[in-house]
Image (spheres, helix red, strand yellow):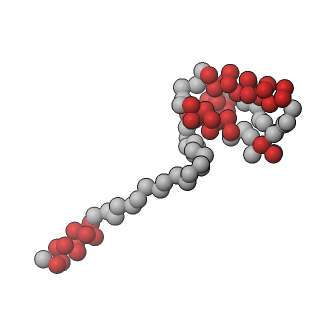
């Protein structure tokens, strides 16, 4: 009987807990995400962390315009846009 139980235990795959995202962690975009690839083909602008209002507003306007037509969630849109932060913005 003990041998059967040990064999059953060995055959069962162990249940691994799903990793929980850290509080405040940015959601990860799968590398193979076709919507993200489509977004990248649009050649989105980068944001370098400019403090000038007009530059930041222009970047935001262009990003919103590009993201508007994509078939993705609002959270994905934020993730996609923040992938293009550079310099002091990142």
Indicate left or right for 5 with 87 as reference.
left
The residue closer to the viewer here, 34 or 59, is: 59
Is 48 situated above or below 11?
A: above
Q: Who's the residue at 68% across and 21% down the image?
A: 65
Q: Quadrant of residue 68?
A: top right
Q: Toward the viewer: 67 or 35? A: 67
Residue located farthest toward the right when viewing the structure as drawn: 52
* Quarter holding residue 85: top right
Q: The N terminus appears in which quarter of the rendering?
A: bottom left
List x then y, in percent, for residue 64.
67, 25
Q: Please count the marks in the image.
A: 0
Q: Position of residue 32 (x, y in %)?
A: 55, 41
Residue 16 in percent (x, y) is at 39, 61
At 54% across and 29% down in the image, what residue appears? 72
Q: Residue at x 75, y 45 (%)?
A: 90
* Residue 18 found in image quarter: bottom left
Describe residue 17's horizontal placement relative to residue 57 as left or right.
left
Instruction: List the single residue furthest toward the left.
Output: 1
The image position of residue 49, as x and y in percent, is 81, 39
Q: Residue at x 23, y 75 (%)?
A: 6
> From where the camera sits, is residue 43 visible?
no
Asked whether residue 75 appears in the rendered view, the answer is yes
């Amino acid at each position: 009987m003990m041998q059967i139980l040990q064999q059953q235990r060995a055959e069962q795959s162990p249940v691994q807990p799903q990793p929980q995202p850290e509080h405040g962690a940015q959601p990860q975009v799968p590398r193979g995400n076709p919507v993200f690839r489509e977004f990248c083909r649009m050649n989105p602008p980068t944001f370098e962390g400019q403090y000038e209002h007009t530059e930041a507003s222009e970047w935001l306007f262009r990003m919103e315009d590009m993201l508007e037509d994509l078939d993705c969630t609002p959270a994905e849109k934020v993730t996609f846009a923040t992938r293009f932060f550079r310099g002091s913005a990142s």
